[in-house]
Image (cartoon, rainbow, N blue to C red):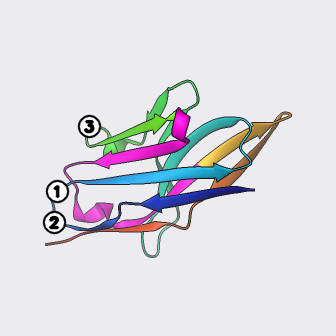
Amino acid sequence: QVQLVESGGGLVQPGGSLRLSCAASGSIFNIASMGWYRQATGKQRELVAAIASGGNTNYVDFVKGRFTISRDNAKNTVYLQMNALKPEDTAVYYCNLQEQLFGRKYNYWGQGTQVTVSS
């Protein structure tokens, strides 16, 4: 089983910064990608950013230029540096790990960490 533990959420003023971390542990064999999703109240969960095992990154338009995803492969940890935060970034942020085994993909999720952007 795979466990994901997130940290780094909190309350920040508009224009501020936060850094989220997600450490993966357990029986991990072949990580295809790690990433961050978010879910605001009353909305569906949506992709924020992802980083593949080879280092390729993918960002959704509304965070490009403001958020940076990075990964420490040795520690199975993924980070999300969030700058120039806006009130609309307020959401629960979830870490995702996608593992690929024998041609099948398996998704694992963290428990979520709250990010609130407010003055």
Q: CA distance from mark 1 to mark 2?
A: 5 Å
Query: Which residue bears the numbered disc 2?
Result: 13
Question: In the figure, residue 88 lies in which quadrant?
Answer: bottom left
Q: Nearer the viewer, mark 2 or mark 3?
A: 2
Q: Nearer the viewer, mark 1 or mark 3?
A: 1
> Where residue 95 appears, x then y in whole percent?
52, 55
Tell me which residue sits at (50%, 56%) in the image.
46
Question: In the figure, residue 110 lies in which quadrant?
Answer: bottom right
- Specify which label sits upstream in the sequence, 2 or 3: 2
Tell me which residue sits at (38%, 47%) in the image.
80
Query: Which residue bears the numbered disc 3?
Result: 65
> Where residue 84 appears, x then y in whole percent?
19, 50
Q: Which residues are magenta?
A: 74-96
Tell me which residue sits at (75%, 56%) in the image.
1
Query: Which residue bears the numbered disc 1?
Result: 16
42 to the left or right of 27? left
Tell me which residue sits at (52%, 45%) in the image.
35
Mark 3 residue element: loop
Q: Considering only vertical position in the picture, is 13 above or below 102?
A: below
